Amino acid sequence: MNREQKSELVASLHGVFANTSLVVLTHYTGLSVAEMTDLRTKVRAEGASFKVTKNRLTRIALDGTDYGGLAESFKGPTAIAYSDDPVAAAKATVEYAKKNEKLVILCGALGEQLLDADGVKALASLPSLDELRAKLVGLISAPATQLVRTIKEPPSQLARVLQAYATKEDA
């Protein structure tokens, strides 16, 4: 890698760190190419990205971002998972790490807040942004549905009483 390519990589990573909500740092020792491809596919399906990085260049790219506290953790074969959704990258990597013990979650950062491995796992257990939106819509629409049912009920009861009187008089 020449100097120009390195500076482009640093600029690219700096842009990633400036525009993302969550970064998860992992060790991937022992993962085969097929397993890495599978991991990238699953992470992409969750709406996140997974990238193997060069530690020294990544530490340079972290300068001036909210994720500067992660710099000391870049040792050994590291890769990062990142996403705009504060839960997606954590969810995807934790799910894959449960199935494949070769992927080790080291730490993460949610903005300036540093997380240890347990913190990343706890974050992964939270519902995603889309799930939260669906629950919110459900909560908002439920009272309206109950209100319509309540308003509609008295006329229905009156109609049943009148029907009962009508059938009683016919008999």
Image (cartoon, grey):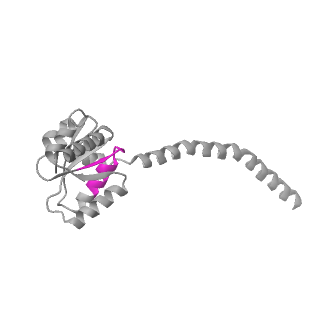
The part of the chain drawn in magenta is 80-95
122 to the left or right of 150: left
Quadrant housing residue 59: top left
x, y (%) of residue 41? 32, 60
x, y (%) of residue 165? 83, 53
Residue located at (48% from left, 48% from top)? 134
Which of 154/49 is in front? Answer: 49
Residue located at (81% from left, 51% from top)? 162
Which of 119/55 is in front? Answer: 55
20 to the left or right of 141: left
Which of 97/147 is in front? Answer: 97
Residue located at (23% from left, 46% from top)? 9
x, y (%) of residue 44? 34, 56
Residue located at (18% from left, 36% from top)? 69
111 to the left or right of 165: left
In the image, farthest residue toward the right: 170
